[in-house]
Amino acid sequence: QVQLVESGGGLVQAGDSLRLSCVVSGRTLSIYAMGWFRQAPGKGHEFVAAITWAGDTTNYADSAKGRFTSSRDNAKDTVYLQMNSLKPEDTANYFCAARLSPRLSVKPSDYPYWGQGTQVTVSS
């Protein structure tokens, strides 16, 4: 099993920055990639970013490119999502998820392990 705990969400103004953290525990040696997804009220999970557990490959949604950066701290088994130049449309509950199969994916269904989410609210 893999356990994920997100933190770092909050209420910010447009243009501000936030850094989300995802602490990973359990069978971390089985993980191939970590994904970040978000869910706005009344909508499904939207892909934001993905990073290999090795930290050597990343993939971003078009909405995140140039503003968001995912990284990993090997020593802390923690994955980060640095979000800059936040916009009101970034408001959502943000989740990290773990994938065991060896391929980065943008599909929520490809990630069997999920955290509880952290709320990000961006005011205009």
Image: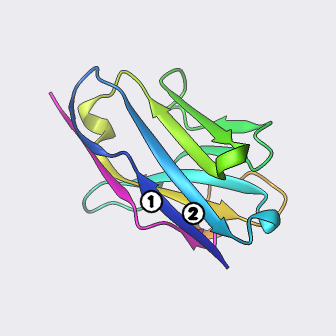
Query: Residue beneath label 2, please?
Result: 108
The stretch in magenta equals 110-124
Q: Magenta includes 117?
A: yes
The answer to whether residue 23 is magenta is no
Please, what is the three-letter code of the amino acid marked with disc 1?
Answer: His
Disc 2: CA contacts within 10 A as few (<14), some (14-19) or many (>=20): some
**Element marked by disc 1:** loop
| Quadrant location, the N terminus | bottom right
x, y percent for residue 86: 33, 27
Q: Position of residue 124 (x, y in %)?
A: 14, 27
Residue at 52 percent of width and 53 percent of height: 22
State the image coordinates of residue 75 (x, y, percent, origin top left): 71, 46
Q: Residue 87 lies in what quarter of the image?
A: top left
Residue under pointer 1: 45
- Left or right, 30 with respect to 1, comes to right
Q: Secondary structure at mark 2?
A: helix
Q: Viewer-proximal residue, 83 or 110?
A: 83
114 vs 73: above or below: below
Q: Residue furthest bottom?
A: 1
Q: Residue furthest front?
A: 75
Q: Is residue 33 left or right of residue 3?
A: right
Q: Residue at x 33, y 60 (%)?
A: 43
Q: In the image, what residue occupies the spot 53% across and 32% down?
A: 62
Please name whichever residue, 73 or 38, is drawn nearer the observer in this view of the structure.
Answer: 73
Q: Is residue 76 above or below residue 90?
A: below
